Amino acid sequence: MKLTRIGVAALAATALLLGCSDDDKTGPNGTAQVRVVHGSPDAPAVDVLVEGKEVLSDVSYLQSSPYLSVPAGTRNIRVNAANSTTTVINANAAVTKDYAYTVIATNLLASIEPLVLEDDLTAPAAGNIKVRLVHGAPNVGQVDIYVTAPGANLATATPTLTAVPFKAASGYLEVPAGNYQVRITPTGTKTVAIDTGALTLAAGQIRTGIAVEAPGGGTPLTALLLADRN
């Protein structure tokens, strides 16, 4: 499995599950659900150690974990440059029981940081879906986001979200199940930077879409679509 120099919270979340025993998972402190996304476009691979034990190695850009059941509590996390003993992060991190999180390692390597989002996995109303949108492209300014029917004329469309800055996440938008197209433009323009094409979403599904850059940073931009709940 591959990841990268993810922020402290992100790495901690994945590592806690892999570094703990089954007894820990069912202990009195309870568990949280945590998913990790590597979203730092120019960050190199790293290894992750929990309480001094290596639990992840060679983690790379745009990879994500499934939701992991993580024992609630605090653990010491160290992040090393891959295949070395050079530590780049050394900290304690905590997760809270009965919560679900998505933790995105974001920004460029020189300023890499965790973006921690609390996930709402409760089912939408019958016949609906829920979609959350995240601006995760560090080299891109504010954007407008359009959620429309496939092929809708963008020239006459009104943005669903306007002036969204880097690291911002919308709440979950609940809409009827069906076919949609998400397009992202620089704020105040109709110049499409990201186009998902037609997306078919079935009733009950929950999705998080993240605007991301090409490996190394910059264009072409694309969208990473995560399944929060099927």
Image: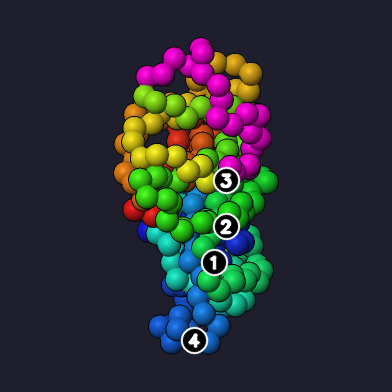
Looking at the image, do the residues carrying marks 1 and 2 touch, with CB atoms under 8 Å apart?
yes
- Assess whether residue 46 is covered by the magenta stretch: no
Looking at the image, do the residues carrying marks 2 and 3 touch, with CB atoms under 8 Å apart?
no
- Of mark 1 and mark 4, the one earlier in the sequence is 4
Highlighted range, magenta? 151-171
Q: Quadrant of the N terminus?
A: bottom left
Checking the image for residue 118, the label placed there is 2
Amino acid type for the residue under numbered disc 4:
Gly
Checking the image for residue 99, the label placed there is 1
Circle 4 or circle 3, nearest the eye: 3
Q: Secondary structure at mark 1?
A: loop
Q: CA distance from mark 2 to mark 3?
A: 10 Å
Amino acid type for the residue under numbered disc 1:
Tyr
Give the side of residue 116 with respect to residue 214, left or right.
right
Q: Which residue is mark 4?
A: 27
Checking the image for residue 171, the label placed there is 3
